[in-house]
Image (tube, rainbow, N blue to C red):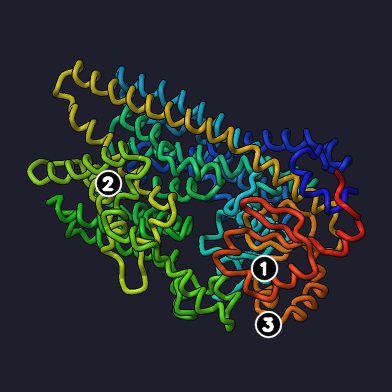
Amino acid sequence: MEKINRMASAHGGCTNVLRAEHVRKLMNPKVNCYFFIGYMTLLAANFGAVLSSLSATLHISSVVLFLVGAALTPTVLGFWTLLLTEIRPKWTPWLLTAVPLLVAGLWGGGRLYAGVVHFQMPRLTFGDYAGLCAVGIVFLLGCRMFFAYARTNNIHHDANAYMDMAIYISENREVRSLCNLTSIFPNFVSEPHGASYPAYLAFAQNFMTEGTMLERQCTINSALQLNNIFYFLSAFAAGLVISGSVWAACGVAMLAFVPRSFHYAVQSFSRDAYRLNMAACLLVFLASAPTLMAVDNAVPYVIALFVFCYLVGDAHALNVLLLGCAALGWIVTLVFSGDSLASTPMLVLASLSCGAGMLLSLRKYIHAYLKTGQFMGNIWRRCAFKGTPHETYMKTAFNCRLPSDSTSWKRKLFHVFKGNLPMTALGVLASAGICAFSLHHAVPFGVMFTAATSLILLLPFTGVLDIGPYQFSDFFVSNIRYPLHWYPIAMITAFSAASLLTPPGNGPVLREGVAALVVILAFWTAMRAFKRWGALFCDFKDPFSKGMKLFEGMEKDAPWDGSIAVSNTGFPSPFLSHRVAYLFSEAYFPLLRADTIEHVETLIRENNISFFVFWKFDIEQFKLKAIPLYQALQRNHVEVYQDRDYEIWGELRQQEEAGPPAG
């Protein structure tokens, strides 16, 4: 076994350090991955057939409902995992995977293959065919890029945090703690979003029950990246039902992944595609209000609004803002549409249904605020230093305030434009133009709704919503991914505006010319974006392979009963077979709160910690060098590795046993 003093050079020339018995099984994960993708494809088709069979009841095109049903696949599997874990904690993997396919096959598959479900295909024009060909090429390139990322060793905070939670669900068969923001996991880092997403990853994890986490990663990565494909389908469905044009829907789908911040979301394996997928599905139902309210029995529509409002809120904490802005845009559109809908009793019922769905998804935040005074509850890093001199500093570090030169509303609003200026300008101009045009002319309800919503969604970036210590605008500017929910709504508005410029009475030549021009521009933009993605992917591999060798080296040198302490989930803790000690989890708060070096040394021995992995940002952000823990490491441990991201400290006695470094 390689000793710890060789870790510093291991990342430069280390050969394969996987155990021999695992090398023989490396083909198995690939086969398992293809099986999982095939399973998801079959299940998505059946779920689509289930929802499309309700076309006559919901009065929405069967094609649109089929796409929405297919896009719901990850969400359905996530909630199925949560339900099964609650009612039967001792479930087996075959029970977890077989029941959804059996139920969907009996309901949707039978109707689909028996021809009971008849797709109401719209009449296609030349521009529509051109758009479908273009979006098909983009879809294939997107699949290739997504699964190229799926084959990498993802070492990133988002992916590792969600995989940690998936492992927790699979191994402990307990989910209620994931929804509790008023307490901290023992030896676990929780997060404020809904539990359905990590539950979906737990579902994927159980497709391969043997082998190391590293070997099972391929299937879980595929589950993560499949969300992008499902988001592609839901964006197309929303564009189709709102614009009423196939070629416009194709343009929306092609530009769904163009924002630069979405590239980071794909690279970091975040849950953005999951939350945006749910948001696009909700747009389908909100934009269909006039049709559904006009029928005698709109109860199914009201139920659908309740379900989708809850699912959107559960998908991501940030979707709470999206729900509020969409509800406001929906009400404004109804009021200014001049339709009798504004006084319809069914509209009141629909509004109450939306509100109930939102409150159900917000319940944990409300509970956390009542218990702790914070909507996010007991933030784990703040709790770590509670009762210490660091507590005052932590309150300052978490108030979401940025440097003074970025606090003006102009700079905050510019954050939306940054890196995506053409798209943002197009979306703002189209939305403002639609709203102005609607003052004197009739505009389709869905188009007016998305235009109003996209403008309202810009409010958080202007400082209008800043109240005292709650600087919402600073919060949204602090992360490049946070404005992502604005782009699909703005692009739907832009392409719908282009479709309105070419009504059927304007002549086929003009209509086809505008459609072809829009499709060509969207295709060209998407191709430029994928070219940029290729460059990102090339830069994506090297640091990840280095990190994999680092933790493989620690795995070899740590005692079998030893622990590896980490300060951040950005380190690949899900792949470690040794116990992981999260320094910012409740079980290890004493290490950070210890007031003497001797106390720290005692705690390290009691917890049998062999290595400490610090993210340098944590060292600076939380001033870790000023606490006894870091000082104890400087006295009794040796820094075995350091780069621009991490510091790794090992036990000094291992260094002494190993002798001088090789070479």
Q: Residue at x 67, y 45 (%)?
A: 98
Tell whether label 1 touches label 2 (CB within 8 Å).
Answer: no
Label number found at residue 583: 1
The part of the image, by quadrant, that contains residue 182 is bottom right
Residue 484: x and y, percent? 40, 47
Q: Is residue 189 above or below residue 127?
A: below
Q: Is residue 372 above or below residue 140?
A: below
Tell whether label 3 touches label 1 (CB within 8 Å).
Answer: no
- Mark 2 secondary-structure assignment: helix
The part of the image, by quadrant, that contains residue 474 is bottom left
In this view, the residue in front, 56 or 621, is 621
Would residue 261 be found to the left or right of residue 385 on screen? left
In this view, the residue in front, 178 or 458, is 458
Q: What amino acid is labelled 2 in the image? A: Thr
Residue 318: x and y, percent? 42, 58
Label number found at residue 450: 2
Residue annotated with mark 3: 595
The part of the image, by quadrant, that contains residue 590 is bottom right
